[in-house]
């Protein structure tokens, strides 16, 4: 049998790029500036953070917002949760 490759999905590409930027630029520059601890937490924090769909569900179901929408920015590297009470 053949070897199966990993499925390349948009979230996987975004996460790979984000991790590359954090590992190659953000944390090293922060380290040079004496701020490593202030930036090193970002990668594990982002990994454990809910995605847009989960944030919308939490806002609507858990916090009682009438309207909730997650708007992606920068090609999905970040986003904003837009809410209406």
Image (cartoon, rainbow, N blue to C red):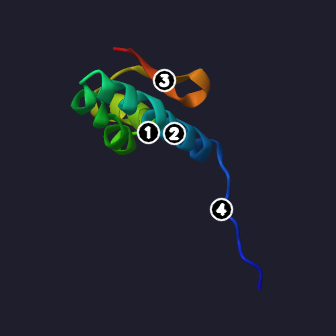
Please name the residue that numbered disc 3 is placed on.
Answer: 79
Q: In what element is the residue under mark 2?
A: helix
Say whether marks 2 and 1 touch (CB < 8 Å).
yes
| Rendered location of residue 39, percent (x, y) | 30, 29
Q: Nearer the viewer, residue 68 or 49?
A: 49
Please name the residue that numbered disc 1 is placed on.
Answer: 23
Q: Nearer the viewer, mark 4 or mark 2?
A: 2
Say whether marks 4 and 2 touch (CB < 8 Å).
no
Q: Residue at x 37, y 38 (%)?
A: 46
Instruction: Looking at the image, tell me whether mark 1 or mark 4 is earlier in sequence order.
Output: 4
Report, in whole angstroms, how far the alpha carbon at label 2 lies from the one at label 1: 5 Å
Report, in whole angstroms, how far the alpha carbon at label 1 lies from the one at label 3: 21 Å
Q: Nearer the viewer, mark 1 or mark 3?
A: 1
Please name the residue that numbered disc 4 is placed on.
Answer: 6
Instruction: Looking at the image, tell me whether mark 4 or mark 2 is earlier in sequence order.
Output: 4
Q: In what element is the residue under mark 4?
A: loop
Q: Nearer the viewer, mark 1 or mark 4?
A: 1
| Rendered location of residue 1, percent (x, y) | 77, 86
Instruction: Looking at the image, tell me whether mark 2 or mark 3 is earlier in sequence order.
Output: 2
Q: Which mark is residue 20?
A: 2
Mark 3 Cα shell of 10 Å, populated few (<14), some (14-19), many (≥20): some
Task: Identify the residue at the far right of this view.
Answer: 2
The quadrant holding residue 16 is top right
Q: Is residue 69 visible?
A: no
């Amino acid at each position: 049998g053949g070897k199966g490759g990993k499925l390349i999905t948009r979230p996987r590409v975004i996460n790979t790029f984000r991790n590359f930027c954090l590992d190659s630029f953000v944390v090293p520059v922060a380290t040079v500036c004496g701020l490593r601890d202030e930036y090193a937490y970002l990668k594990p924090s982002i990994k454990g953070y809910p995605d847009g769909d989960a944030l919308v569900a939490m806002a609507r179901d858990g916090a009682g917002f009438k309207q909730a929408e997650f708007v992606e920015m920068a090609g999905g590297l970040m986003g904003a949760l837009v809410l209406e009470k």
